[in-house]
Image: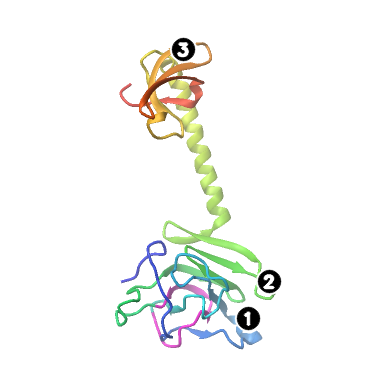
Amino acid sequence: MFRSLRNLTLLVVAPLLLAGCVLSQNITPDQQATHALVISAISKDAHGACASPGNPLDCLYLGYVDDKASGLAAPQLLVLPGHHVISTVWSHGVIQTLPSAPLVFPTFDYQAGHRYVLVPGGIYDTAWNDPAHPIVVTYVVRDGHFMNQQIVSAMDRASAEAAESAFRIQQQRDRPRIMKKGAEVCLHGGSGIGNHGFVEGATDEKIEIHLSSWQGNDRDIWDFPTQWFLCGHN
């Protein structure tokens, strides 16, 4: 049974059969133009990146393309362009000390002429012809498939900004109730016993909050009401 990128610990095993690809040694210009190079930068424990991507002594082997095996597994592979699911090697249950399931990279559109480096949870699209192989695009897993990290970051920022805007609108509506004695309030963005209390008093600018527990002791603080919102049994 296949397991996800987040939950798997793997070790390198002996070469296995692999389908839909050819080994990357002695790549010809024609192959570079018509294939994508896929390189493992996955450490043997599958939790981090190996020191030298593609090094057979340091990196986990890539074992399957689209769940098929008909060639030698290797830390570097050439695949035809298109959407592929690539997996690392696994033990098939023969060697009990090795994992019984591969690390699976969800379907991704590998393009001809590109050099992809696989790391746990991500794919780096790197410059093939530059000896330094700088990262051109980083892809990360979101909702079960790979997306451009810059797009994901922009989506996260937009979501956070929308949530903050909605909070501020609601908090402004609740401000008169927040300023009243006895209101139960929680600190925006906070958690734990030090971020919950009851309003004891108010001035034009601040509210006095009685924190029911602060390291085992009650405590009163003054703060701006913009940092607090109604919660609990209001």
- Tell me what residue is drawn at x 36 percent, y 15 percent: 182
Let me know if residue 111 appears in the view. yes
Let me know if residue 79 appears in the view. no
Q: Which residue type carries mark 2?
A: Ala
- Identify the mark nearer the N-term, 1 or 3: 1
Nearer to us: label 1 or label 2: 2
Q: Is residue 71 above or below residue 227?
A: below
**To which residue does mark 3 refer?**
202
Q: Is residue 54 above or below residue 155?
A: below
**To which residue does mark 1 refer?**
33
| Numbered badge on residue 143 | none
Q: How is the image coloured?
A: rainbow
Q: Is disc 3 placed on a helix, strand or loop?
A: strand
**To which residue does mark 2 refer?**
132
The residue segment tinted magenta is 68-89
Q: Is residue 103 magenta?
A: no
Q: Is residue 166 above or below residue 208?
A: below
Q: Is residue 207 above or below residue 28?
A: above
- Tell me what residue is drawn at x 46 percent, y 12 percent: 202
Q: Is disc 2 placed on a helix, strand or loop?
A: loop
Q: Which residue type carries mark 3?
A: Ala
Q: Which residue type carries mark 1?
A: Ala
Q: Is residue 83 left or right of residue 35?
A: left
> In this view of the protein, which residue sits in the foreground, 52 or 101?
52
Q: Is disc 1 placed on a helix, strand or loop?
A: helix
Q: How many marks?
A: 3
Nearer to us: label 1 or label 3: 3
- Tell me what residue is drawn at x 49 percent, y 70 percent: 42
